[in-house]
Image (cartoon, rainbow, N blue to C red):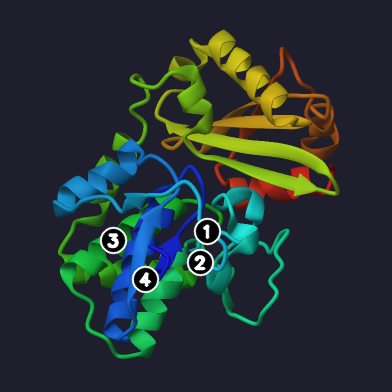
Amino acid sequence: MENEILIFGHKNPDTDSICSSMAYQILNEKNGRKTKAVRLGNVNKETQYVLDYLKIEAPELIEKVEENQEVILVDHNEFDQSVEGIEKAKILEVIDHHKIGNFKTSEPLYYTAKPYGCTATILFEEFKQKNYTIDRKEAVLMASAIISDTLLLKSPTTTEHDRKALQELAQISNINLEEYGIEMLKAGTDLDDYTAEELINLDAKEANNNGVKFVIAQVNTVSIEDVLKREEQLKLAINNTIKEKGLSLFVFAITDILNSNSEIIALGEKANIIKTAFGKELENDRFFLEGVVSRKKQLMPNIDKNI
């Protein structure tokens, strides 16, 4: 694997991380450049729905990279969210739609960052700029990523770029956006098979602000009440993670994708920042946020600036 350029998204990969890695491998092939899409964690049920729909396999799982391994990061830039060994890897490119965090390289690189709702939208525009034909597989991969990250264009992170990209990709792939999108999102809300520990790590992102380590995790559901039936198990799993990783805060967002609201569980020594960040008092380690569905735009900025 040393001689291959690896493309990967963040740990606990979501649909954008995996689909964008695969789409960017295809784009590189069209450019005559050999790369390999890989993943840094298990495939969630939403992403598996996409892979099953296309009848394709998930990228290979890797746990670390060797020194000087050439890599391309998609859908993330912070080392806390990346693969073990990333500090000593040779980062050739970053393609991302998040804020720039604790990121440092020893050599120049190509860095593409746009404030879009999804990394795949950036890739779609690159396909278009190079006048490459987008086939059905590529269209489904990128469309699925956009549906996931924008909650079928309902998230406040959605931009006009995402809307235009998704409409064109839907035409190319010949999918009914509402039908396919809702079924895909619903597949990701099937949480019954997961343990509490797995649930809090399905889509968890670590961050470090001035030495304060914290995690913001999120699960999508059609029933917040069903998830909260396991509240005590979830809190136990969260507290265990706080202890194991030396975290000051763990925020777990249970997001209702039908009504666009989130119930938040916040634990850790810094849990009291919730009051200043959101103007909410914690009641039994929980609070409700109406109209909040986006970690990137609605949760992370408020928490980050109050750490």
Residue placed at 37% from the left, 75% from the top?
124
Q: Which of marks 1 and 4 is in front?
A: 1
Mark 1 or mark 3: name the one nearer the start of the chain.
1
Residue 21: quarter of image: bottom left
47 vs 277, left or right, is: left
Measured in 3D between alpha carbons, the distance from the residue under mark 1 to the one under mark 4, in whole angstroms, is 22 Å
Residue 193 is situated, as x and y percent measured from the top left of the image, at 33, 20
In the drawing, what numbered circle is on residue 284?
none
Q: Element at badge 1?
A: loop
Asked whether disc 2 touches disc 1, contact meaning CB atoms under 8 Å apart, the reply is yes
> Residue 141, which numbered label?
3
Residue 66 is marked as: 1
Q: Where is residue 6 in the image (x, y as percent from the top left)?
A: 42, 65
From the image, tell me which residue sits under label 2.
69
Look at label 3 and name its amino acid.
Leu
Tag 3 or tag 4, which sits nearer the N-term?
4
Question: Which residue carries the number 4 mark?
Answer: 24
Say which amino acid is labelled 4. Answer: Tyr
Mark 2: give few (<14), some (14-19) or many (20+) Cα within 10 Å. some
Q: Residue type at mark 1?
A: Glu
Residue 42 vs residue 111: left or right?
left
Instruction: Say which amino acid is labelled 2.
Output: Gln
Q: Earlier in the sequence, mark 3 or mark 2?
A: 2
Q: Nearer the viewer, mark 4 or mark 3?
A: 4
> What is the quadrant of residue 54 in the picture?
bottom left
Determine the residue positioned at 38% across, 50% down. Answer: 15
Q: Where is residue 3 in the image (x, y as percent from the top left)?
A: 40, 71
How far separated are the C-alphas under marks 2 and 4? 18 Å
Mark found first going from the N terminus, 1 or 4: 4
